[in-house]
Image: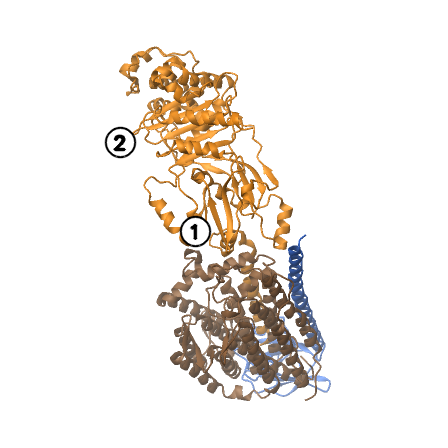
């Protein structure tokens, strides 16, 4: 072992340390990223346990896709406007088709003057109607069910 | 403004205090052949700047994302270590008659960029300027491009640079940000129309032209100008950002498909029409056909990758010289990634890519959490610009796509690139801050 | 819009994965291939500044030395007689000969000890070059080269018992030092060498392919005796007549060479070889038969390239052919009897290298066992002062391999006897001229030999050939087997035979003198 060799070992150790430290930092970033992802999942779970959601039963244009459970806030707009809370892509739906609101302790649906009307459990509504969990809503050709 | 404690950010910045000076010391020991760490002033200055920026964010009550800045600082730190290891005469500036070396110049630009980042992150509150004057911004951007085209200086066959006094900068970087602002504003406004109304041609839904046309027109103009100025890398980047933002805004894969088809068609035409494109593509397909002429850059870069192997040659121990020079041209800009891959190996290259991917992930997260469409789209556009730029340059280095004159964000030498990247970061931080302020959290 | 962002995240992740894959390809999967390309700066840089190991002759005289002057490795070659076998290591023109075959050891890139190699790699130690010691004795090599001076030709000398190459030189030769130094000053000398009409860069001993003429009769006799097609007393009844009228084979008439004043008679093997009768050997060839003849030729090494050395570090020689070269290399079958008959006395499509014929002679000399050729005896650690000889620690030594039997011991001794007669027999002496014995018979020692005068088309002077070995008296173990060719040298007895005899004599002198 010459002095040259000790220098070489020093250099080797430093090289390993450099890359090693870089990777430790990388893992620290990874951990933070995952933590945030999991907490985001948790808030979504919490939101899901909220006041209610709409499960899509029928959707000819597949937007929203069948089977999706759409989380609901206290006030939800439903329609063909992309900015709606519940965006429904259907030729028979109007831009601002209906409003779904949670007042007090129950849900209410109100038609917004749509062209083809809003249907609850098959009946067309002409004034705000209270909904129970399990009721089916028909916007255009899209059928959805209100669930907890 | 109340002081916010940004613990995660501090925790992730502290390792740099060891990492960057260690990198400097290591390169010096290898070069000197004795256990002498050499001058660490630049390394310590960098660490001080980074921590200073952090302190500024803390004192000014910034509540934006806490991972973004450390990711950029780490990437920039590794880049600075590499730039310091390379011969300092490769690039630099002449400040009042004094020749300033490459790493020092980069540090100066770091300082300027960090100040800009903090300023934008903290003080940029009202994005109404961006949102409501989008056409003005677009025109300004196009105007800047015209000026560059007419009065710019040509470097390496691309007329990209504008000289004002002692400084040469790339307006392309600024135009990139302006482009994002404009598209974000336009798409946010017109999103409903673009996504909702449709006409069918077979299974593909075509957007209504009157609404798409103004944006396409301005975009096409920008593209043509960029192509004429011979910088294909920027053209690819702009196009990519445009398609990405369009996809996110409308959700229509068909738009992306049409866009890709147009791109392939346009590329083919360019291949036939422009001799320099032809050369670039042929060289990409088989660089070994002319390893000393047109293929030289690509071939030498590939050799560098090969020499690097899994663990690299070691910092300061790779990059063999031919006739006293490093045989890879533009190693401090276009090929900086290759240099890192050679000396730090696949593990080092992968680490750098992972950092870039993490940055993109955070940017997308900011976009998801953003409160309104405009901010969300802005975040998408800004994040995509960083991510796509990284992908394009690395893919070009590795011969997956033809080579372009694009820089690696935060790593490549170059004031304009560095400043633009940190401005992007600042804007992302400001969006994140507003989201957090509204929700009462810290990002 | 959020689901779109998630989808975008997926696409971007995919893009990063693809790019990572691309880099992995170059850094890991294809790295070996990239590293071997000659314009790779790593290879170039290593070569430029790498100290090369010294190459010594069998007695430790340095033949090729290196010094690193201002970062450039300069190679100096001491002896032009060795220019072909050692080759050159030129920064501009690459490596040839032993410099090429042992390049990795000479530059130190390869280490026979794998553990030390790994340590060197990790610690980044500079590779240590290795020195080579050859089996060739400089004194013999220089002697042989001097005999050939002024002519184009080659001498190959082998130790029949061990397979060690004792001498291997080709003339005209060249000075390898100017082309091995500074790449910028190498272009002019190289251009001059390439432009020279007598082609000094070609190694005639290994790569010169010539018509052998009568020396082929050694192989014909070996094949015939070993297969039992003839015995030493076999005669062919029509042969005396055919000496004058010619031998008709399939409509073609084979004619005897000019016998001069000699009168044709019924000759058995010994006499036939002494006068070098083409008619006799044409018969012998037909007796052996096309397939069997081809088989024996291949056993002696014909039809595929010869190699000196073993493993991955070999010097190769061009293949020798008995018939026309086949489409995928190798020998085609004989087309007809005429070709077989003509090949038996070394004409038709037969093309040989001097190395091949020396190997044939060595096999006969070694009792019918073909030795395994080698030219590098020792590999040692680099000695800093070459003038003191190969003082480095011994790393590897070639122990002579056993060789493999090609013809029976009986057949070998019968051929040996015939070859002794060819040099020392009454007809041999008569045929070759009375003064001939003292020329190529080594005095006091029995010599076996065969001359060859290879006819060439186009009115060119024939090649002068000689193969032989000594000492050849019964009970003695031959110490040297030679093959000599002088291009366009005329009769075999004229130029080649005296050179062959003198080279053998010189070697026996050196053997008895040096302790």
Chain identity of mark 2:
C
Chain painted orange: C
- B10 to the left or right of B303: right
Q: Nearer the viewer, residue C296 or C23?
A: C296
Asked if B190 appears above or below C344 in the picture, the reply is: below
Looking at the image, tell me whether mark 2 or mark 1 is earlier in sequence order.
Answer: 1
Please say whether residue B155 is visible from this viewpoint: yes
Residue B91: x, y in percent? 50, 72
Circle 2: element type: loop
The colour assigned to chain A within the rendered structure: blue
Q: Nearer the viewer, residue C179 or C235?
A: C179
Residue C10: x, y in percent? 58, 68
Residue B419: x, y in percent? 54, 78
Residue under numbered circle 2: C458
Circle 1: element type: loop
> If the image is split into quadrants, where does the C terminus of chain C sit?
top right
Q: Which label belongs to residue C92?
A: 1
Q: Are marks 2 and 1 on the same chain?
A: yes
Q: Nearer the viewer, residue B71 or B166?
A: B166
Circle 2/circle 1 CB separation < 8 Å: no
Task: Tell me how many marks there are.
Answer: 2
- A80 to the left or right of C287: right
Chain identity of mark 1:
C
> If the image is split into quadrants, where does the N terminus of chain C sit?
bottom right
Other residues around mark 1 within 10 Å, as few (<14) / some (14–19) / many (≥20): some
Residue B252: x, y in percent? 51, 73
The colour assigned to chain B within the rendered structure: brown
Q: Quadrant of residue C486?
A: top left
Asked if C467 appears above or below B415 in the picture, the reply is: above
């Amino acid at each position: 072992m010459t002095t040259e060799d000790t220098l070489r070992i020093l250099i080797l150790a430093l090289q390993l340390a450099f890359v090693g430290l870089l990777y430790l930092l990388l893992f620290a970033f990874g951990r933070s990223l995952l933590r945030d992802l999991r907490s985001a999942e948790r808030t979504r779970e919490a939101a899901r346990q909220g006041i209610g959601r709409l499960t899509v039963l029928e959707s000819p244009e597949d937007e929203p896709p069948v089977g999706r459970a759409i989380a609901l806030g206290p006030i939800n707009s439903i329609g063909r406007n992309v900015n709606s809370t519940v965006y429904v892509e259907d030729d028979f739906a109007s831009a601002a088709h209906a409003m779904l609101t949670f007042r007090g302790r129950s849900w209410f649906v109100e038609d917004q003057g749509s062209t083809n009307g809003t249907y609850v459990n098959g009946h067309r509504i002409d004034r705000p109607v209270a909904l129970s969990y399990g009721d089916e809503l028909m916007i255009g050709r899209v059928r959805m069910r209100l669930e907890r | 403004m109340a002081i916010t404690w940004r613990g995660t950010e501090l925790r992730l910045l502290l390792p740099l205090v060891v990492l960057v000076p260690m990198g400097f010391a290591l390169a010096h020991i290898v070069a000197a052949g004795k256990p002498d760490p050499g001058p660490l002033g630049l390394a310590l200055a960098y660490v001080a700047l980074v921590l200073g920026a952090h302190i500024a964010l803390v004192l000014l009550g910034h509540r934006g994302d806490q991972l973004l800045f450390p990711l950029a600082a780490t990437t920039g730190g590794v880049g600075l270590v590499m730039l310091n290891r390379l011969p300092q005469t490769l690039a630099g500036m002449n400040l009042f008659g004094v020749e300033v070396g490459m790493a020092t110049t980069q540090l100066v630009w770091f300082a300027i960029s960090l100040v800009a980042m903090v300023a934008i992150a903290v003080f940029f509150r009202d994005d109404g300027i961006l949102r409501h004057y989008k056409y003005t911004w677009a025109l300004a951007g196009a105007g800047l491009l015209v000026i560059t085209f007419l009065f710019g200086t040509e470097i390496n066959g691309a007329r990209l640079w504008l000289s004002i006094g002692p400084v040469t900068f790339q307006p392309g970087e600024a135009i990139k940000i302006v482009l994002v602002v404009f598209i974000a504003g336009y798409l946010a406004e017109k999103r409903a129309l673009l996504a909702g109304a449709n006409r069918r041609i077979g299974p593909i839904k075509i957007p209504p032209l009157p609404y798409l046309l103004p944006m396409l027109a301005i975009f096409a103009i920008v593209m043509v100008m960029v192509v004429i100025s011979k910088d294909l890398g920027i053209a690819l980047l702009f196009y990519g950002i445009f398609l990405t933002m369009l996809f996110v805004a409308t959700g229509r894969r068909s738009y992306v498909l049409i866009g890709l088809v147009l791109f392939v068609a346009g590329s083919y035409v360019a291949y036939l029409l422009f001799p320099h494109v032809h050369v670039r593509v042929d060289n990409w397909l088989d660089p070994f056909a002319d390893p000393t002429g047109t293929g030289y850059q690509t071939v030498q870069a590939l050799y560098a990758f090969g020499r690097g192997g899994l663990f690299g040659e070691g910092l300061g121990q790779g990059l063999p010289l031919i006739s006293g020079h490093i045989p890879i041209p533009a190693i401090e800009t276009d090929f900086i990634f290759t240099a890192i891959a050679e000396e730090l190996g696949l593990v080092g290259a992968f680490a750098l890519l992972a950092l870039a991917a993490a940055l993109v992930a955070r940017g997308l997260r900011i976009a998801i959490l953003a409160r309104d469409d405009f901010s969300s789209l802005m975040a998408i556009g800004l994040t995509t610009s960083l991510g796509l730029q990284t992908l394009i340059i690395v893919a070009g280095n590795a011969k997956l796509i033809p080579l372009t004159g694009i820089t690696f964000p935060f790593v490549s030498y170059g004031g304009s690139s560095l400043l633009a990247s940190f401005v992007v970061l600042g804007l992302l931080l400001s969006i994140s801050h507003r989201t957090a302020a509204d929700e009462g959290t810290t990002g | 819009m959020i689901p779109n962002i998630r989808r975008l995240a997926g696409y971007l992740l995919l893009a990063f994965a693809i790019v990572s894959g691309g880099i992995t390809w170059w850094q890991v999967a294809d790295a070996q291939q990239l590293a071997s390309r000659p314009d790779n700066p790593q290879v170039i840089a290593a070569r430029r500044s790498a100290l090369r190991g010294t190459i010594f002759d069998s007695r430790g005289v340095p033949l090729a030395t290196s010094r690193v002057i201002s970062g450039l490795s300069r190679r100096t070659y001491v002896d032009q007689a060795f220019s072909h076998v050692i080759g050159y290591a030129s920064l501009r023109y690459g490596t040839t000969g032993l410099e090429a075959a042992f390049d990795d050891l000479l530059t130190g890139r390869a280490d026979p000890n794998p553990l030390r190699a790994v340590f060197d790699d990790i610690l980044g130690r500079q590779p240590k070059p290795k020195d080579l010691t050859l089996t060739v004795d400089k004194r013999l090599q220089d002697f042989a080269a001097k005999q050939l001076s002024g002519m184009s030709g080659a001498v190959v000398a082998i130790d029949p018992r061990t397979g060690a190459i004792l001498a291997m030189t080709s003339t005209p030769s060249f000075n390898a030092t100017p082309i091995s130094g500074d790449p910028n000053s190498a272009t002019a000398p190289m251009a001059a060498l390439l432009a020279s009409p007598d082609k000094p860069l070609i190694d005639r001993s290994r790569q010169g392919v010539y018509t052998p003429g009568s020396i082929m009769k050694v192989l014909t006799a070996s094949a015939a005796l070993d297969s039992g097609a003839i015995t030493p007393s076999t005669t062919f009844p029509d042969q005396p007549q055919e000496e004058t009228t010619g031998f008709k084979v399939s409509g073609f008439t084979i004619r005897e060479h000019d016998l001069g004043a000699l009168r044709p008679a019924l000759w058995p093997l010994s006499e036939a070889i002494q006068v070098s009768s083409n008619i006799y050997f044409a018969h012998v060839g037909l007796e052996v038969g096309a397939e069997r003849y081809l088989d024996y030729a291949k056993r002696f090494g014909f039809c595929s390239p010869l190699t000196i050395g073993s493993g991955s570090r070999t010097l190769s020689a061009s293949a020798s052919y008995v018939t026309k070269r086949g489409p995928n290399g190798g020998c085609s079958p004989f087309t007809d009897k005429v070709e077989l008959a003509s090949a038996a006395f070394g004409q038709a499509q037969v093309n040989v290298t001097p190395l091949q014929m020396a190997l044939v002679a060595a096999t006969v000399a070694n009792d019918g066992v073909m030795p395994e050729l080698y030219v590098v005896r020792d590999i040692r650690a680099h000695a800093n002062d070459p003038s003191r000889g190969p003082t480095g620690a011994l790393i590897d030594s070639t122990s002579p391999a056993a060789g493999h039997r090609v013809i029976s011991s009986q057949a070998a001794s019968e051929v040996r006897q015939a070859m002794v007669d060819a040099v020392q027999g009454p007809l041999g002496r008569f045929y070759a001229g009375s003064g001939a014995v003292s020329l190529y018979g080594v005095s006091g020692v029995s010599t076996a030999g065969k001359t060859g005068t290879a006819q060439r088309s186009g009115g060119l002077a024939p090649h002068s050939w000689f193969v032989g070995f000594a000492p050849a008296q019964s009970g003695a173990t031959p110490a040297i087997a030679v093959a000599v060719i002088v291009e366009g040298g005329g009769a075999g007895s004229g130029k080649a035979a005296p050179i062959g005899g003198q080279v053998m004599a010189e070697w026996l002198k050196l053997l008895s003198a040096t302790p």
